[in-house]
Amino acid sequence: MIENAQLISLSRQIALQRQMDVVANNIANLNTTGFKAEQILFEEYVMPTARHNDFPSLDQPLSYVQDWATVHDLQGGAIVQSGNELDVALNGDGFFAVQTAGGERWTKAGAFALNNQGVLVDQSGNPVLGNGGPIQFGPDETGISIAADGTISTSAGPKGQLRIVEFANAQELIREGSNLFSGGTPVANTSTRVMQGHIERSNVSGVTEMAEMIRVQRAYESIASLTQKQDEMRRNAIQRLGDANA
């Protein structure tokens, strides 16, 4: 019986540890442009394997805790004006497409720049994709203008159009490093609008995440205390049995 209780407590501690990792990552990206928070879904995992002669029937179900999945909180962050002509925010559910060494990736972070070759890149140096591939500017071009549909033009004329993609089920996306997502089935943009000179802030609520961190820490400490008491009960039981058999 004590072993069963300890295993159930351990399953909850493991789940809380995973939840703490997610909360800590959210807080660490509180000021990351375009960052989307994560949340964990838990489920009850039932195992009908507990046995004891005092049970009405030999088998009784045990309920464990299991972290079932991590979901993306894709609610939009605050869009603020920056005044930088290469800052671009997306008003809608769409994502920018960028080219990485591992293939195409998706991001909400629109704080772009130009590299030494005049190619439009993200903060990690990945080329930002247009409908025809990476977008490159000449050294003498000025007056970069980005329309609401992503069409880019300069003093030299049209330069292409930002590739904006949407997803029927964005929860299929896999989070990667550098504020990028992979996977999913991208479809053409239908409702997302581009806002030049703006950036989308992280959608993480610092107050909410700090409160969640405190709650998770207290829950973990409570279970740790319970586990310690269960260990003491086991030691006392072993000692009494030893004294009785002496």
Image (tube, helix red, strand yellow):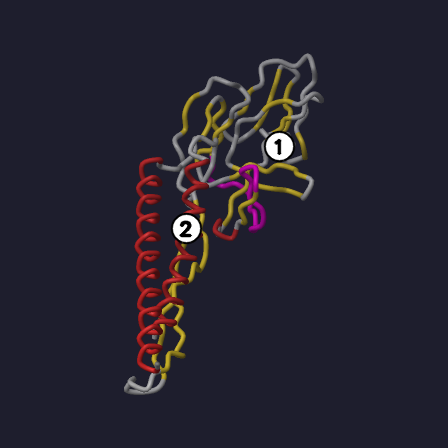
Q: Could you tell me if the residues under marks 1 and 2 are in contact, i.e. CB atoms within 8 Å?
A: no
Label 2, secondary structure: give it. helix
Residue 171 in the image: above or below residue 158: below
Return the residue found at the far right.
Answer: 117
Badge 2, how many Cα within 10 Å: few under 14, some, many 20+? many
Point out the tag, 1 or 2, that comes first from the N-terminus. Answer: 2
Total labels drawn? 2
Observer-nearest of 189 and 69: 69
Q: Amino acid at mark 1?
A: Val
Badge 1, how many Cα within 10 Å: few under 14, some, many 20+? many
Main structural element of the magenta stretch: helix, strand or loop? loop
State yes or no: residue 158 in magenta: no
Look at the image and give the residue range highlighted in magenta.
Answer: 177-192
State yes or no: residue 178 in magenta: yes
Q: Position of residue 139 (x, y in %)?
A: 69, 14
Label 1, secondary structure: give it. loop
Read off the residue under disc 1.
128
Return the residue found at the far front.
Answer: 246
At x 35%, y 35%, the residue is 206
Q: Quadrant of residue 124?
A: top right
At x 41%, y 44%, the residue is 23
Of badges 1 and 2, nearer the viewer stands 2
Q: Amino acid at mark 2?
A: Gln
Image quadrant occupied by the N terminus: bottom left
At x 40%, y 75%, the residue is 47
Read off the residue under disc 2.
19
Q: Position of residue 201 (x, y in %)?
A: 43, 31
Residue 25: which numbered mark, if any? Answer: none
Q: Position of residue 209 (x, y in %)?
A: 35, 41
At x 47%, y 32%, the residue is 32
Observer-nearest of 153 and 68: 68
Image quadrant occupied by the C terminus: bottom left
